[in-house]
Each structure stands twice: as C-alpha cells, then as structure tokens.
C-alpha cells in the first residue's frame, strides 16, 4: 500500500474537544470547494443530525476492534469512553485521486498521521481561552458534567502539544479563523 502523499495534499486539523474543529471545517468547505475530508470510524453514538458514512462510520466496539485486528486503521485512539480511527483505504483513495484532504482529528491521532505522512501540514486549533472552551462544551448540551470535566482535563494536556504542529490558529472569530486556515491551504 502506498502511504506517501504523491498525488493529493494532506492537511491535519486538530485541537481539543470543543475548539470548533468541525465548524471550522464546514466553513472551509463553504469557501474552498477543493477541500475534502476522510470519514473516520467511531464507537460513540451519533449526535443529532449526524449521518453514518458522512460524519463518521458508527460501529460497535466489537466491529471496531475486528478492524484493528485486520490492520485497517492508519491510526486509532481512545478518547474518553470511545474509540476513533482513520481507515487507511480512505486516505489512500483520496490522495490517489489528487484531492486536498483536511483531516479533522484528535491530537493523538494527528501526531500519528504526521509520522505516517511527514509531508502533511498540521494545524492546531486553539480556543481563545480555557473558559471559552468550557462554555462551548457545556453549551452543546450533549455531555454529562463528568464527561465535560474529563474532556477539559484531556484538553489541557492536548494544548501542550501545539508546538508539535506546523501552524497554530486561534478560533476566536469563525470567519477570521476559516480565512487563516484557507490561506495556509492555498500556500
């Protein structure tokens, strides 16, 4: 299998839970029609309005680990109570088609992708502050207080990794953030 970026371009957009990765990605898609995203696999339950095969491939833990055993993942991580993984076939298919891939991925997974694709460009998305991050997580209304506290603790550790990325962008104003990341992609 060819795991080198020979035809397409690979960008990794990463940051702590609640920093707005998916919202920023959606904004990028609105202004840059060349951007595509891989669909990751997860064991977590779908959120309202999420579609299997579009937002994630939602599977049981048993199915997930069957794929782990088969070597189908480029990377996978445990985040809180759930697992997330990037399928090798997704990346290779899009790169071979010459696509500009923007992977929206958690920090551990992003570092694994960078090791596998050293020519990829990594972008760390930061919240304006820990307080804003906490407010964003709570405003989702989808997580228990215990889960929010776990996510905030993980976020504090993840933000220490920002210097391992090619770029850091603060998601304070959505339009400004999206424009800044699009400029990185256009370079």
Image (cartoon, rainbow, N blue to C red):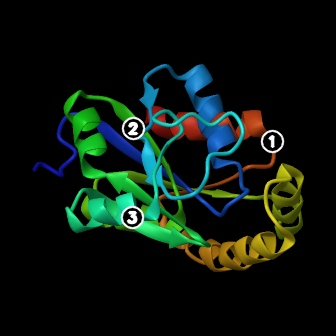
Residue at numbered disc 3: 62
Q: Is residue 108 above or below residue 121?
A: below
Q: In this rendering, which labeled residue sits more in front, label 2 or label 3? A: 3
- Disc 3 residue crowd, few under 14, some 14–19, many 20+, Cα 10 Å: few
Q: Secondary structure at mark 2?
A: strand
Q: Secondary structure at mark 3?
A: helix
Q: Is residue 47 above or below residue 152?
A: above
The residue sitting at 26% across, 50% down in the picture is 88
* Left-right relation of 39 to 179: left
- Disc 1 residue crowd, few under 14, some 14–19, many 20+, Cα 10 Å: few
Q: In this rendering, which labeled residue sits more in front, label 1 or label 3? A: 3
26, 117: nearer the viewer: 26
Residue at numbered disc 1: 173
* Left-right relation of 184 to 176: left
Q: Is residue 50 visible?
A: yes
Give the alpha-carbon distance from disc 2 to disc 3, as whole Å.
29 Å
Residue at numbered disc 2: 101
Q: Is residue 87 above or below residue 178?
A: below
69, 3: nearer the viewer: 69
Q: Earlier in the sequence, mark 1 or mark 2?
A: 2
């Amino acid at each position: 299998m060819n795991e080198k970026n020979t035809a397409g371009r690979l960008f990794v957009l990463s940051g702590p839970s609640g920093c707005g990765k998916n919202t920023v990605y959606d904004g990028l898609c609105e202004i840059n029609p060349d951007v595509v995203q891989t669909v990751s696999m997860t064991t977590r339950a779908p959120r309202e309005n999420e579609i299997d095969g579009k937002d994630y491939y939602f599977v049981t833990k048993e199915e997930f680990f069957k794929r782990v055993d088969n070597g189908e993942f480029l990377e996978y991580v445990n985040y809180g109570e759930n697992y997330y993984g990037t399928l090798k076939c997704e990346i290779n298919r899009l790169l071979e088609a010459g696509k500009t891939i923007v992977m929206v991925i958690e920090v551990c997974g992003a570092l694994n992708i960078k090791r596998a694709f050293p020519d990829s460009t990594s972008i760390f998305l930061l919240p304006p502050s820990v307080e804003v991050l906490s407010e964003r997580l709570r405003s989702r209304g989808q997580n228990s207080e215990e889960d929010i506290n776990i996510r905030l603790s993980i976020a504090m550790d993840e933000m220490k990794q920002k210097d391992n990325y090619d770029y850091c962008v603060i998601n304070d104003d959505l339009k400004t953030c999206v424009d800044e990341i699009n400029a990185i992609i256009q370079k």
